[in-house]
């Protein structure tokens, strides 16, 4: 039986739609199991400075539908140092917090892993990032909403692209992962996606143009994953201007639009399931794990696995895009 009586919860790193739904589920899951909850503001920063508040069930009322995070988020360089983490630990002891639930991306879970090992302290993580780049979970909280936002934007840009016979490169987020670009391209009917996972093995731009882009269509839309490897939409457009000057090229960078907005039904459900699962993990005395979802079932993935492996892109999707965009 678990000895955890009081948990602390925080969101850290880049915000993602669905983080609030996760905060709500973790809080209510904990309270319904007789634990008390402390909300920690601004991620690891607030943990170090002691920006901590008692969280009751009403603190999380009316937030499931809201984007962003009511706990705020921050980046915190002190937490990357042993001294900073020691301060964080002292703060947890002082507040009587026996376990930590963190919601964030790769960086947040890396910090959580180091901290948990250093102090032999129970930490459970939830994958909160629009990038979907954590290994061991089919999807991350925020990914579906971001994908839907991308679709809305691409649909709008397509009107202009087709009115003017233009080739548009639309840059989407992903931090070195092509999930948003590839699935966004399939769902929006784009002609191609340029993604870091296969940049080294094929020249995606040349392939797309060789395919005879202009033979059947007057306008084209290509989704480009932001990344040094792809060069981003600007980099690709520069190359086209030099190598294929016959095209009338435009660039659109969607940027932070993709991180905001009300979470989709799928993200709310995912976040709620994962939030409850995080508490169940603590009740089972699990630590150092991230909640994940695989084939619709909740799984627990050791931090080391979630952050260390490069999550592979599903190659079937590349084929699907290639065929569906002829
Ligand atoms: P995300 O969680 O969205 O990937 P970041 O990469 O910015 O966002 O990480 C969020 C925070 O996690 C950082 O500001 C830092 O406090 C903590 N963190 C990231 N990497 C490490 C690390 N190697 N050691 C300790 N803490 C880290």
Image: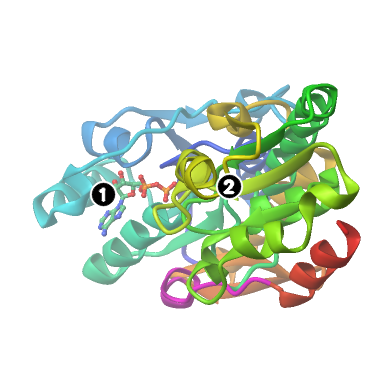
* Residue 182 drawn at (x, y percent): 70, 57
Residue 166, can we see it? yes
For label 1, count other residues whose C-alpha is less than 10 Å away and answer few (under 14), some (14-19) or many (20+). few
Q: Which quadrant holds the N terminus?
A: bottom right
Q: Which residue is found at the position 47% from the left and 44% from the top? A: 242
Residue under circle 2? 244
Q: Which residues are magenta?
A: 303-313
Residue 219, numbered label: none
Q: Residues within 10 Å of mark 2 (few under 14, many from 20)?
A: some
86 left or right, relative to 105: left
Q: Residue 280: horizontal and vertical position, in percent? A: 64, 64
Q: Which residue is mark 1?
A: 93
Q: Is residue 5 shown above or below 303?
A: above
Location of the C terminus by quadrant is bottom right
Asked if residue 9 lies left or right of residue 86, the reply is right
Which element type, helix, strand or loop, lies under badge 2?
loop
In the image, residue 163 sits, relative to residue 83, either above or below, namely above
């Amino acid at each position: 039986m678990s000895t955890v009586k009081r948990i602390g919860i925080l969101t850290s790193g880049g915000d993602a739609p669905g983080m609030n739904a996760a905060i709500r589920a973790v809080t209510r899951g904990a309270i319904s199991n007789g634990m008390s909850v402390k909300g920690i503001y601004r991620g690891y920063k607030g943990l170090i400075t002691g920006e901590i508040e008692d969280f009751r069930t009403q603190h999380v009322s009316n937030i499931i539908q809201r984007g962003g995070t009511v706990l705020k988020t921050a980046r915190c360089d002190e937490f990357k140092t042993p001294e900073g983490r020691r301060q964080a630990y002292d703060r947890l002891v002082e507040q009587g917090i026996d376990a930590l639930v963190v919601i964030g991306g790769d960086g947040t879970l890396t910090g959580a892993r180091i901290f948990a090992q250093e102090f032999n302290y129970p930490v459970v993580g939830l994958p909160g990032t629009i990038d979907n780049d954590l290994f061991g979970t089919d999807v991350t909280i925020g990914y579906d909403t971001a994908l839907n936002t991308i679709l809305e934007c691409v649909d709008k840009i397509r009107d202009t692209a087709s009115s003017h016979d233009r080739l548009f490169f639309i840059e989407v987020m992903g931090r070195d992962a092509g999930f948003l670009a590839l699935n966004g391209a399939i769902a929006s009917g784009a002609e191609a996606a340029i993604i870091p996972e296969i940049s080294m093995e094929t020249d995606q731009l040349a392939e797309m143009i060789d395919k005879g882009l202009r033979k059947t269509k007057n306008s084209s839309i290509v989704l480009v994953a932001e990344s040094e490897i792809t060069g981003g939409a600007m980099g690709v457009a520069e190359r086209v201007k030099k190598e294929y000057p016959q095209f009338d090229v435009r660039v659109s960078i969607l940027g932070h639009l993709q991180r905001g907005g009300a979470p989709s039904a799928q993200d709310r459900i995912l976040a709620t399931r994962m939030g409850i699962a995080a508490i169940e993990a603590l009740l089972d005395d699990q630590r150092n794990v991230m909640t994940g979802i695989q084939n619709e079932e909740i799984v627990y993935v050791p931090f080391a696995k979630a952050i260390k492996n490069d999550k592979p892109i599903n190659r079937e999707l590349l084929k699907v895009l290639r065929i569906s965009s002829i």
